[in-house]
Image: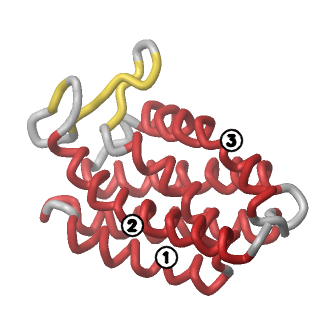
Amino acid sequence: MPTDIRLRVGAAALAAFLALIPLANWMVLHVGTACIRGGPCVVPVAPGLLAPSGVLTVGVALVLRDVVQRCLGLGWGLAAIVAGTLLSALVAPPALVAASGAAFLFSELADFGVYTPLQRRRLVLAVLASAGVGLTVDSIVFLWLAFGSLNFLAGQIVGKLWAVAFSVPFIRLLRRVAPA
């Protein structure tokens, strides 16, 4: 595909990636089927499983960072991680600044570390494997630092996996737009 399409897809992915960060930080304290006093607002992600509502956007953000790297290059992928970490720390509610910033940084670096070596040969596998690692790291770091508990860990992981699974058809399409 032409380079201009690749650049437009990459720029759109970067913009969406950066937009999801403040949205996730806002949602975790304002959107949900229930809001726990001193804790997050939660949503059901499977029968009997609740998760902080930000999971709905974080799973997509992990995939979008992979798209940024695929379309714009390694440097832009790393720049997106740095910008996202700073943005996360700037927009997170005061009680969540450290948790949000640290979770974002560590999860995106884990995602990057898994995605980078796999993406040239097996794009869908690279996205799924890197997102799986990234969302697990994000969930553990965020829940522990924000709430001192891993009570919502299973829900966090399942919720983010839903978002990643939803992205698979788009990743298959990406292979045509941005071949290795």
| Sequence-wise first label, 1 or 2 | 2
Residue positioned 67% across, 80% down in the render: 73
Q: Which residue is mark 1?
A: 80
Residue positioned 24% across, 45% down in the render: 27
Locate the N terminus and report the quarter of the image it occupies. Answer: bottom right
Q: Residue 88: horizontal and vertical position, in percent? A: 31, 68
The kind of secondary structure element at disc 2 is helix
Q: Nearer the viewer, residue 118 or 176?
A: 176
Q: Do residues under tags 3 and 1 come within 8 Å of each other at their CB atoms?
A: no
Q: Which residue is mark 2?
A: 18
The residue under label 3 is which amino acid type?
A: Val
Relative to 3, say whether 30 is above or below. above
Report, in whole angstroms, how far the alpha carbon at label 3 lies from the one at label 2.
Answer: 20 Å
Report, in whole angstroms, how far the alpha carbon at label 1 lies from the one at label 2.
Answer: 8 Å
Query: Does residue 60 appear to the left or right of 96 in the view shown?
Result: right
The residue under label 2 is which amino acid type?
A: Leu
Q: Nearer the viewer, residue 98 or 53?
A: 53
The kind of secondary structure element at disc 3 is helix
Q: Do residues under tags 1 and 2 come within 8 Å of each other at their CB atoms?
A: yes
Q: Is residue 110 shown to the viewer in this render? A: no
The residue under label 1 is which amino acid type?
A: Ala
Q: Which residue is mark 3?
A: 168
Query: Does residue 130 appear to the left or right of 158 in the view shown?
Result: right
Report, in whole angstroms, how far the alpha carbon at label 3 lies from the one at label 1.
Answer: 21 Å
Residue positioned 43% across, 67% down in the render: 15
